[in-house]
Image (cartoon, coloured by chain):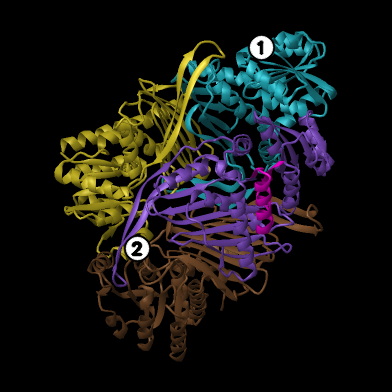
Chain colours: A purple, B brown, C yellow, D cyan
C-alpha cells in the first residue's frame, strides 16, 4: 500500500485525492493546504485523512512513501526536491518544473536515490488520445502532414506562468506521445494583455521531416474550444474534446497532385469518402495516471509520463518562451 | 450603363457575370475564357452575351467600359495593365496582384488615366462583417485585444500561389476594414506538402498597441472551418461563418486583473453575462461589390475595396511570404 | 425534345424552369404566372421563353407536350385535369391534389388518355434518401422499429392547406419509398393558432407489424430542424438534413432484453459501437426528378414518384386531417 | 438536524446521499440496499453511515426523521406508506406512485399524520427551468402557443414501467411548473419493441385555450436529445439541455396573419430579430431539492414539488397509459 501525502487542495487537488483513495494499492494519509477552508472540506469528506498547513509535516513523515505536488509551477522544484531528499517518490502536476535546469536536477536526484517521478500529463491516459495514437501507430493515417491544435477558453489566469506553460503541456505531451518524430525547433508569438504574462500565444513546432505542428492557446476566449486536426496522407483526424460524444472523427479525405505543369494545368485528385467515428473508452484518465504511478513504484514499470517525458515538455516550453522574447524567432531545441 | 467585359469564367466568373447582369446600371457584353465548354455555358444562359477566347477582343473593344479580371493571380497585373492602357476601368479578383511593385504600378497608371480599380474583397460587403464593424466602431467591444481567425478546408489548390495568397486576402481585408489600427509587422510559418507552394500556414500580425492578430490557413483540412474570435475589453465576438444562422455571437465575458501580488494572490474578476446574437443582413455581398464599382465609376464614390485597399493587402501578403522564407522572422511592413 | 409549359413562377417555379432548361431532352416554351413581376423576371433570364398570365394559353397550345403545375394545392386538380384533357403530360407540385377523389379521377383520366403524371416528391431523389434506402434494403439496419421525423421552421404559411399538407408530403413520401411495409392507420393531433389551418401537428402512423412512425410538423418554430431518427434492430440512423455535411450517421447501437423476471432482474444488453457517416451524392435532386419525368414520357420508364405514389400520399394526408377532426382518433387507411 | 434513512443506492441513490450529507441541516444515518456491493461502496466513502439490507431497520428506527425512497416505482407506495405509518417524512423518487389511487392514499395519510411528502422532480430546480419560468411569468413570451419536448436516448430500460413513466415525469412536471393553465386531456401513442413496456411513445396534451403540448419519448434512440421548443406570440424559446453552455435561446421571431382573403392573398408578416441567450445559474439542482425538503419539514414552507405536485403528474401519466391502451383516444383528466 503506497501511502501518499498530497500538497495542494485547490482546483485539481480534490481529484488527485479522490483517485488515490479509490486505488486499491494506495491511500492518502495527509493533505496539506494553506487554506483552512480547503482542509475543512477534506475532513468532511475523508474523516480518516490527516490535514496540515505545513508541507514539512509531509516531507518529514516516516509514514509517507510518495508526495503528490498539486501546487503552482514555481513551487514544483523546491517541493519535489524536498520530497526526493526525504526519500519519497514524486507525483507532480504538469509542467514538471519552471526551467529545464530544475527538471534535470530533479531527474538526477531521483536516479541517484532510486526514486520515481511522474508528471500528471493526464490527457495521455484518455481514451481519445489512445485511440488517435492507435490510428497513427497502425499507419491508418499514413505519413503525417500536420498536427494543429486549438485550446482556448476563459481561463483561470495563473500569476507565475503564461498561457503557454499552463495550457501547452497538454498538447505538447499529447504530440510527444502520439508522434514518433520529435520536434527540432519552435517559434512562438503572443501577447500579454492583463499583466506581464502572455494570455494569448501561438506556437509552431518544426520537425526534420514534412511535419508541422501548431498550437493556438488563449485564456481570454469567450468560448471553450479544444480542437485538434491531424492531417495524414491517407486519412485525417478531427478531435473535438468539448463535445460529449463523437469526439474523434476519421476522414477519408485527401489531395494528390498529379502534375504541376503551367498555371492552369495543376492536376489534382481530391479524395472524399466515408467518415468513421470510432468508439472511445470512457475510463477516467486520472485513475489510470494514479495506477501507473503505483505500478511504477511497486513494479518498476516505467509509465509514459515519467520524469523524462516531463523534461522533454519543459524543454519545449522553454524554447517557446525564448522565441516570444525574440519576436518569434525560430529556436532550436 | 457600364458595359463590362469579363475575363475568366471558371469557378467564380459565373457569379461575377450574374451580378453584373442583375445590376441596373451595368451589363456584361463580352465573356472571355480559354475553355470552349465555359463559353458554351455562357451562351446557353445568356444568349445575348458575346463570347471569345481572346482577351484582346475585350481590351480593344470600343464598346467596353470596364474589365472584370477573374483569372489566376499571376495574370492579374498584365491583364489589368492592358485594360488600363486601353482606357478601361478594372475590377479584379483578390488579391490585386502578385507583388507590391505591380500593385503600385497599376495604381499609378489608373490615377494618371483617371480610371478606377476595385478589388473583389467580397467579404467586406457581407452582413456579418458589417455587423462586426459596427460593434467595433461603436465601442461595444471596448479596446481590442486580439483578432484570431481560422479558415481551413479541403481546398482548391492553386498552382501559382500558396495558401496564404489564396485564403488570407479574405481575412486580412476584413481585419483591415474592421480595425482602425494598422498592423506594423508580420511573422508567418508554414509548410508545403504537395508541391512547392505552402498548403498550410500560420500568420501573426503585430500592431503598435496591445492588439495581436493571427490567421490559421489550411488547404488540407478534412473539415471546413471559418471561425473568427475577436477579443475586446468589454465584449467578445465569435463569428462562425460556416453555420447557416446565428453566425455572430457577442459575449459579455471578460477578465479583469485586480492585483498581482504574489503567486497565490492574483486577484482576478471574471465577467460572464448574457450572450447576444444580432440579426445579420442576408443580401448577397457580390451584388454590393458590383454596385460599389458602378457607383465608383459613375459618381466617383470611392468604395472600401479600391486599389489602395488592394495594395495594403498585397503588402501584408508579401511580408508573410518573406517571413516564411526567413524561418518565421518578424518582417516590418 | 419535350416542350414544357410551366404554370406558377413563385417560390419554387424558378427551380423547375431552371432544371427543365438544363435537361438535354426538354425545354420550357411558356411560363404562366398572374404576377407581372414574375413574368418580367422570366424574360430577363430567359429571353427565349414565351410568358403569359393566362393558363389557357398553355393548355391550348399545340406546341406544348407537358405541363408543370407549380401552384397552390387547391388549384392542382383543375389545372391537371385541363392539361390531361388537352393531351398533355402532367408534372405537379406535391401534394398531387387536395382530396383522394380528385387524385383518383386524375389517375383514371391519365390512364384513359395514355398520359403520364408525376408528382414532385423531390426528396426521393436526394443522395441522403437513397443512401438510407440502401441501408434499409440491404438489411443493414435489421428489422425496423421506428421512423421518427421532425420538420419544423418559421414556415411560409399557406392559406389553402394546413401544415400537414404542406410539410408531411416530404416525410410521408420518403417513408413510403424507404419502407416496404405500408402504414395501415394514422392518428394526428394539432392546433391552428393563426387562422383556421393547423400550423402545428403531430402524426402517428401504425403498421401491421412492430413499426411505428411519427412526424412532428410546425410552421411556428423559431429554428429550422429537419431531423429523422430510424431505429432498427441492428443499426440506427440519424439523418440531419439541416447541416451541410455529415447528414447521415449510422450508429451501431442497440438494446437486447435477455430476461425479464422480476423488477430488479431485467437483464438488458446494450450495444454501443463505432459510428459511420457514409458519403452522400450531391447531385441536385430536382434535376433527377425532371430527368425521370422525361424518361417516363419518352421511354415509359415508371418513376418512383408517379401518380400512384402521389395518390398514396394524399390518402395518408386525408386520414391525418380526419383524425385531427376526431380528436386524434385512429383512422384506418 | 434532519436524520435521513435512504433506501436504494443504485444509479441515483449516491447523488441523494451526497446532497443530504452536504446539507447543513440534514445528515444520512442509514443506507439500505439489497446489493452488498452498494453497501460496501457506501461504507468506503462514508464510514460514519450505518448500512443495512433490510428497509425495516429504517422504518422502525427512532433515530430517523425522514426516509428517502430511491427504488423502482412499483415499490414506492408500500415503502412510502410504511414510512408515513412510522411517523417519518417522505422524499420519493419520481414518479410519486404507480397509480393515482396510491398517490391519493399517501397524501391523505401524510395530512392525517402531519407529515411531509416531496417528490424528486429535480428539473424544477435547475437554472434553465427557472430562467424559462421567469420568461413566461414576466410575459416576455406573450401568449403561449405550444410546448414541444423531445427526450430520447439509449435509455436504461425499466422493467416495471414504460418509457412514459420513466421520462415524461421530467417534462410533465416542468410544464406543470412553467405554465399556469393546466392540461385537460391527453392523447398518447407508442410501441413496445423489446418487452411488453412501451419503449417509444408520443404524448399530446390539450388545454382549454390555444395551447398544445407534445412529448416525444424514446429509450431506443442512438443519440441523446433533450430539446424543448416553446412558442409564444411575442418570443420563442429553444432549450437544448444536452449542450454544456448556451442551453436557452430566446428568439424574437413570429408570424402575424394580417388578412386571409383568397388563396393567393394570405397576408402574413414575419418577424425575425435578434437572438438572446440568457446566462443560467449553475447550482446543482438536487442540492436545492434537498434544501426544499428540509425547509418543508423544519419551517413548513411548501415546496413546488410537494405531494400534490406529484399527484398531478401521476394523473397525467395514468391518462397517457389509458390513451395508449385505447389507440390514441383523447382521455380527459
Residue range corresponding to the magenta coloring: A88-117
Task: State whether residue B243 appears in this view.
Answer: no
Disc sitting over residue C40 in the figure? 2
Image coordinates for residue D306, horizontal then vertical, percent: 73, 22
Image coordinates for residue C17, horizontal then vertical, percent: 29, 55
**From what the image shows, is residue D171 above or below residue A267?**
above
* Disc 1 crowd, CA 10 A, few/some/many (<14, 14-19, 20+): many
Image quadrant where one finds the N terminus of chain A: top right
Chain to which mark 2 belongs: C
Q: Nearer the viewer, mark 1 or mark 2?
A: 1
Left or right of B262 in this view: D176: left
Foreground pick, A26 / C281: A26
**Splitting the image into 4 quarters, where does residue D102 fall?**
top right
Q: CA distance from mark 1 to mark 2?
A: 74 Å
| Dots 1, 2 in contact, CB < 8 A | no
**From what the image shows, is residue B43 above or below residue A51?**
below
Q: Which residue is mark 1?
A: D77
Amino acid at each position: 500500500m503506497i501511502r501518499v501525502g498530497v500538497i495542494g487542495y485547490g482546483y485539481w487537488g480534490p481529484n488527485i485525492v479522490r483517485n488515490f483513495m479509490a486505488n486499491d494499492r494506495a491511500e492518502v494519509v495527509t493533505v496539506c493546504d494553506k487554506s483552512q477552508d480547503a482542509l475543512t472540506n477534506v475532513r468532511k469528506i475523508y474523516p480518516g485523512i490527516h490535514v496540515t498547513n505545513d508541507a514539512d509535516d509531509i516531507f518529514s513523515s516516516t509514514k509517507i512513501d510518495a508526495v503528490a505536488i498539486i501546487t503552482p509551477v514555481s513551487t514544483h522544484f523546491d517541493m519535489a526536491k524536498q520530497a526526493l531528499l526525504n526519500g519519497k517518490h514524486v507525483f507532480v502536476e504538469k509542467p514538471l518544473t519552471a526551467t529545464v535546469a530544475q527538471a534535470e536536477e530533479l531527474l538526477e536526484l531521483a536516479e541517484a536515490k532510486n526514486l520515481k517521478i511522474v508528471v500528471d500529463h493526464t490527457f495521455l491516459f484518455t481514451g481519445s488520445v489512445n485511440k488517435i495514437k492507435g490510428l497513427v501507430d497502425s499507419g491508418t493515417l499514413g505519413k503525417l502532414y500536420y498536427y494543429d491544435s486549438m485550446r482556448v477558453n476563459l481561463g483561470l489566469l495563473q500569476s507565475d506562468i503564461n498561457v503557454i506553460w499552463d495550457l501547452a503541456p497538454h498538447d505538447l505531451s499529447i504530440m510527444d506521445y502520439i508522434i514518433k518524430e520529435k520536434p527540432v525547433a519552435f517559434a512562438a508569438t503572443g501577447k500579454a494583455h492583463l499583466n506581464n504574462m502572455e494570455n494569448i500565444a501561438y506556437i509552431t513546432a518544426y520537425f526534420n521531416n514534412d511535419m508541422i505542428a501548431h498550437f493556438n492557446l488563449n485564456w481570454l476566449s469567450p468560448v471553450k474550444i479544444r480542437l485538434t486536426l491531424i492531417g495524414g496522407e491517407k486519412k485525417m483526424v478531427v478531435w473535438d474534446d468539448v463535445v460529449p460524444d463523437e469526439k474523434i472523427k476519421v476522414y477519408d479525405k485527401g489531395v494528390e497532385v498529379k502534375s504541376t505543369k503551367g498555371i492552369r494545368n495543376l492536376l489534382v485528385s481530391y479524395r472524399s469518402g466515408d467518415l468513421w467515428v470510432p468508439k472511445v473508452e470512457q475510463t477516467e484518465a486520472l485513475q489510470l495516471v494514479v495506477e501507473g504511478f503505483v505500478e511504477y513504484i511497486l513494479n518498476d514499470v516505467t509509465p509514459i509520463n515519467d520524469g523524462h517525458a516531463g523534461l522533454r515538455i519543459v524543454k519545449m516550453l522553454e524554447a517557446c518562451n525564448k522565441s516570444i522574447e525574440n519576436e518569434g524567432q525560430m529556436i532550436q531545441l
